[in-house]
Amino acid sequence: MLEKIYLVLYELSILILKFTLINVFWFLVNIPVVILAIQLYLTTEFSNLLTLIPLLTLLLPLVFFPTTNALISTTRNYLLESQEFKFFDFFQFLKQGYKNSFIIGVFYTGLATAIGYLVYLSYTTSLIIVMILAVFFIYLSMNTLCLLFFEAHFNMTLYWKFRQSLLFIAKYPLFALVNFMIFTLLHYIVYSVSYILFLLFGEALIMYATYYLFLKKLDRIKRASKQNTGGTYDNH
């Protein structure tokens, strides 16, 4: 009994160490994004917004999306028992997936900026338009998260991954919505508990939890697909 408890505690400590390493790497690279986001939150001058918003829009695809993709890819390695832990996995995945994650970032940031601008134009004139735009923004965020999961998991073209992410949400909207809600709720909980915890391993833990659910869903789909048609998804 004591040996089992020791083994569980040991594996948990190793997992927390892994989370801490990749989370610190992710945060350090994203410091420019964090600084701009804080300034954007605190500013009260409209003239400052005209500078901060374009800078943040530029840094999201250049920094935030590639590092987040690297975080997800590293988390994927931790979820697969056959993969050994390597100290600089994060930076290897950052280099390998930079191009595709940059394109994903441009796609998301461009549409999100357009939605924000339309909301700015419509929020005093049409509540219905604002609500429609809000729903579209949630769908865009769901699809982007799903696309990043596909990007980390499959060795296919970006077009194939984008198409599969759309089909995945269309076929399994409830799962996609629930997983996105869990993703959002976990961020809120971690932020509420402690900013320090978030900086240490919060984002890695959140990605681990939601990506774990995504992989479990893919496994169920593959098992069902093999029984019917011989298989649909093949990972790396």
Image (cartoon, rainbow, N blue to C red):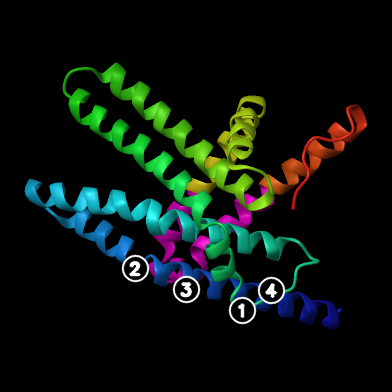
Magenta highlight: main SS: helix
Task: Of the two numbered discs 4 and 1 on the same chain, state the one appearing first in sequence.
Answer: 4
Label annotation for residue 234: none
Report the mark closest to the observer, 4 or 2.
2
Helix, strand or loop under label 3: helix
> In the rendered structure, which disc, 2 or 3, sits on the residue that comes first in sequence?
3
The residue drawn where x is 15% and y is 52% is 51
> Separation of disc 4 and disc 3 at Cα?
18 Å
- Which is closer to the viewer, label 4 or label 3? 3
**Camera-side residue of 45 and 196:** 45
Which type of secondary structure does the marked residue at label 2 adopt?
helix
Which range is magenta? 185-213
**Considering only vertical position in the picture, is 198 above or below 133?**
below
Residue 2 horizontal/vertical position (percent): 83, 82
User: Is residue 205 something one can see in this rendering?
Assistant: no
Please tell me in which quadrant of the rendered image residue 108 appears. Answer: top left
Marks 4 and 1 close (CB-CB < 8 Å): no
Q: Is residue 207 above or below residue 114?
A: below
Question: Closer to the N terminus: mark 1 or mark 2?
Answer: 2
Judging by the rendered image, the residue that carries numbered circle 4 is: 12
Determine which residue is flagged by label 3: 24
Q: Which mark is residue 87?
A: 1
